[in-house]
Amino acid sequence: MPRDDFRALPVRLRRGDAFLRYLYVKAHRGDGQVAPRDRSLFVAGLPLRLGEQAALRALFSAFGDIRDSAVHPSKRTAIIVFQTPASRDATLAAAASGSVVEYIIPNTEALGLKVWLDEYKAERPGNLELQKRIDKWMIDFEEEEKRKKKEKEEKLNEEGWTTVHRKKSGKRTRGGDIAVQPISRAEAQRMKQKAKLKTDQSFYKFHSKEKKQQEILHLQSKFEDDLKRVAEMRRKRNFKPG
């Protein structure tokens, strides 16, 4: 069988277990520097527990010392670089002959579908746990806001500003108090001009509204006069002398 073809390497992960998992290995055509062609092995079909560097090295160290290894982010494929070409060749020979490699995982560790289920449940903790996380986030957020507010007040005090707190009357709002701070002369002038503009706009609106009301009253009066005139014309037209 050519070295470029995949070979199935049987692996037993439980002691005395008749169930075998198969890894698919072949010679890796490396770049000659990081992954030398005569010592590199490409591995596919990694189960979940073997997709970690430590487990992968422990498994393939049965064929010889390992110089380097790299696992794909999907954790389903990897590249093994042995110290000697003989170790790589021994791995391919074991796969070709169907020799079983044992890498015993403790019975306390999950395998296969149970691993996927555990990961799924860990990512979806349920409504109660989710509510706890939300509550903690809200508490942390409020504490951070208080810290920022305190830092701002301290900075204003250092610059000579005075921060005055007072209880807000009327409807209660979250937070309980408000901060009243002095403003600069330019800011006060800008606010004054803004207030004046708002007053002028309000007066203009009131004047326009009053003018419209007068026009409506005038039209209503004119309409009533027209009704009286029409009634008078009808009365004269229907007049019959005795």
Image: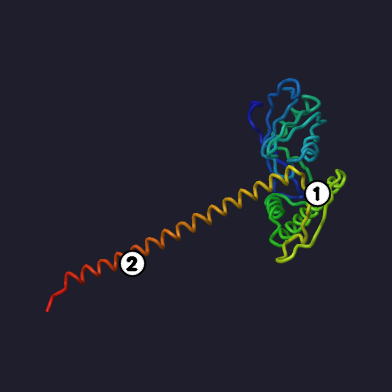
Residue drawn at point x = 78 percent, y = 60 percent: 177
Tell me if label 1 and label 2 are in contact, CB under 8 Å.
Answer: no
Q: In which image quadrant can residue 176 be found?
A: bottom right
In this view of the protein, which residue sits in the foreground, 221 or 48? 221
Name the kind of residue labelled 1 in the image: Lys
Circle 2 residues within 10 Å: few <14, some 14–19, many ≥20: few
Whole-percent x, y for residue 238 in the image: 16, 72
Callout 2 secondary element: helix
**Rendered-image quadrant of the C terminus:** bottom left
Q: Which residue of the protein is positioned furthest toward the right in this rendering? A: 158
Indicate which disc residue 148 carries: 1
Q: Position of residue 92 (x, y in %)?
A: 71, 31
Question: Which one is earlier in the sequence, the residue at label 1 or at label 2?
Answer: 1
- Nearer the camera: disc 1 or disc 2: 2
Looking at the rendered structure, the kind of residue marked 2 is: Glu
- Residue farthest to the front, as pictured: 242
Residue 149, image x and y in percent? 80, 51
165, 87: nearer the viewer: 165
Residue at the image position 51 percent from the left and 55 percent from the top: 207
Most extreme residue toward the bottom is: 242
Badge 1 density bin: few <14, some 14–19, many ≥20, Cα 10 Å: few
Which label sits on residue 224?
2
Q: Name the residue nearer the viewer: 124 or 113.
A: 124
- The reply, left or right, for residue 148 in relation to residue 232 is right
Q: Is residue 184 visible?
A: yes
Residue at image position (81%, 35%) is 61
Q: In what quadrant of the picture does the N terminus appear? A: top right
SS at circle 1: helix
Residue 113 badge: none
Q: Quadrant of residue 100?
A: top right
